Image: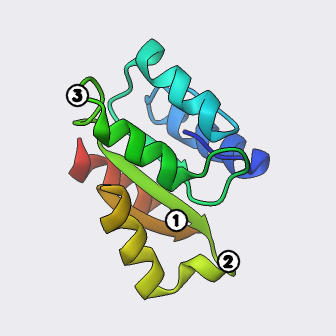
Amino acid sequence: MVDDDLDFVESTKLKLEAMGFTVEVAYEGKEGLKQVPKFKPDLVFLDVMMSVMNGREVCQKLKANPATQNIPVILLTGVGDHVTTTTYSHRDVLESNADDYLPKPVRLEVLLDNIKRLL
């Protein structure tokens, strides 16, 4: 999970770990990009709006790398951001080659459905 929203990261991590998932965390895009080869995740959540390197950029780099291109990626963004409009979110997914897009706050059931579908 790569997200700069500490509260969201910690609460989501605890919930997913309680369900048996192992969750590694990075709090900004460059850090997350460095951790992917180290941890070899089955799936990556990326916040769209982060400083230094945003989620779209991280996703594009993951999808361009043969070693990581097949890892499913879900883009996440906060409700109320200007990027949550349907047109922009679909464009984000298409332009970054993400596998899915979810607005925050994300209901746990929806997140789990998408995890199961992508895995």
**Nearer the camera: disc 2 or disc 3:** 3
Residue beneath the point at 42% across and 17% down: 37
Q: Position of residue 51 (x, y in %)?
A: 73, 50
Q: Farthest residue to the top: give it.
A: 38
Q: Quadrant of the N terminus?
A: top right
Real-space CA distance between mark 1 and mark 2, rounded to the nearest whole angstrom: 18 Å
Residue beneath the point at 26% across and 36% down: 69
Looking at marks 1 and 3 on the same chain, the residue that comes earlier in the sequence is marked by 3
**Nearer the camera: disc 1 or disc 2:** 2
Q: Which residue is mark 1?
A: 107
Lateral position of residue 113 relative to residue 5, left or right: left
Q: Quadrant of the C terminus?
A: top left
Q: Are marks 2 and 3 in contact (CB under 8 Å)?
A: no
Amino acid type shown at disc 1: Arg
Residue 40, above or below 92: above
Closer to the camera, 119 or 62? 62
Disc 2: CA contacts within 10 A as few (<14), some (14-19) or many (>=20)? few
Question: What element does badge 2 sit on?
Answer: loop
Closer to the camera, 21 or 34? 34
Disc 3: CA contacts within 10 A as few (<14), some (14-19) or many (>=20)? few
Q: Which residue is mark 3?
A: 66
